[in-house]
Amino acid sequence: MNNSTTLGTLSQGRNNNLNILRLVASFMVMYMHSLALSIAEQERDLMYTLSFHKALSGQVAVDIFFIISGFLIYRSYDRSRNIPKYLKARFLRIWPLLGLFILSTAYIIGPMLSKFSRDEYFATGLKDYLLNLFFASSYTRLPGVFTTHINFSVNGSIWTLRYEVICYLLVLVFFPILIRKKEAIGGLIAISAATYLFFNYGFTGDHFYMIPSGILLNLGRLSLHFEMGILYYLYREQIPMKVNLFIASIVGLVASSYFIDYEIAFAIFGTYMILFIGFHDSAISRAYDKVGDLSYGVYILSFLAQQLVIEWMAVSPDGYEYVRMDPYVNLGVSIVIVVPLAFISWHLFEKQLLKLK
């Protein structure tokens, strides 16, 4: 590769690894959930070992999503600077599949799977679950559904979408500042990092001025990675994309994560790694791009599929209160179910709606 190549140069092309990288991240989330849902032993997660017991595969995958999103979403608005168009595009990408999932699970799948009668199911109430339609809830259980499982949730992945939407809105808030003084992104990153560190290590209460501390912790962490993506976009013409810097970033991540918080280490070194891989081209990614962008469908549908596989195939060993199964069988069977569904979702639903942007 030419030593003079910058991120700005690489990111101009249409051929890149971003779609397949997001698909891999979606599978990382599935892998983490297979261990959590099937046997409740997340410490067996390979990433947990590689990160010196500081991060799980799904955790790293979500960081990857937000880094990529920060770069691409800020670039999208920077190119158009049209607020209605920007909001419409973001809505069409996030909400329709989420809305379809929430409504279908609440009113079709839930009553079919619940241990309660139909009348009892609806009498229990769905308000907290339906609030996920407006990103105003993190409640993901349905009455009487999966009550013999280790985890009762119908979808433990959608909690991140609230923070994704907040970051979309932050782009509109901070763009007027960053367009005049792009170095201000350093201050935003510092604020997000400080928020994350404070609520992860310093604050011990459940609420901070009536706001659940967990929300502020997640917002600090995820906005940090989103803003790192923005940082790389703003300085894309000054950031060289070199193999030796990529290798140095890997070494830096491994070494620093042993001594400091993994999220901070990943923000510093992981961002370069992800964008280096993401904005290069490969034959595999070109072939995958012809298939479609399946990552969001996999992300939204996989948790329910994994729970259904447990419902159909798991057993209750002597001495255990909840059903269990081999996590790798769960992962394999779930992938076989989810990938075709995500393919159908992309071509018949998501892709068609995106034409309305």
Image (spheres, rainbow, N blue to C red):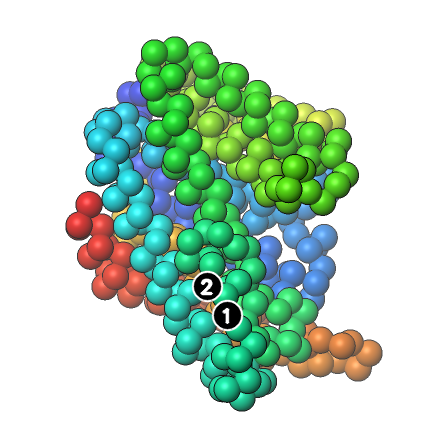
Read off the residue under disc 2: 130
**Viewer-side residue, 145 vs 345:** 145
**Viewer-side residue, 154 vs 47:** 154
Residue drawn at (53%, 23%) of the image: 189
**Viewer-side residue, 92 vs 38:** 92
Q: The C terminus lies in which quarter of the figure?
A: top left
Query: What percent of the width, then of the height, locates residue 80?
Result: 21, 29
Q: Secondary structure at mark 2?
A: helix
Residue drawn at (50%, 16%) of the image: 186
Read off the residue under disc 1: 126
Residue 26 appears in the picture as rendered: no
Query: What percent of the width, then of the height, locates residue 133?
Result: 41, 58
Residue drawn at (42%, 42%) of the image: 165
**Residue 16 in the figure: left or right of residue 190:** left
Marks 2,1: beta carbons within 8 A: yes
The mark total stands at 2
Query: What percent of the width, then of the height, locates residue 3?
Result: 37, 14
**Residue 7 in the figure: left or right of residue 198:** left
Residue 186's tag is none
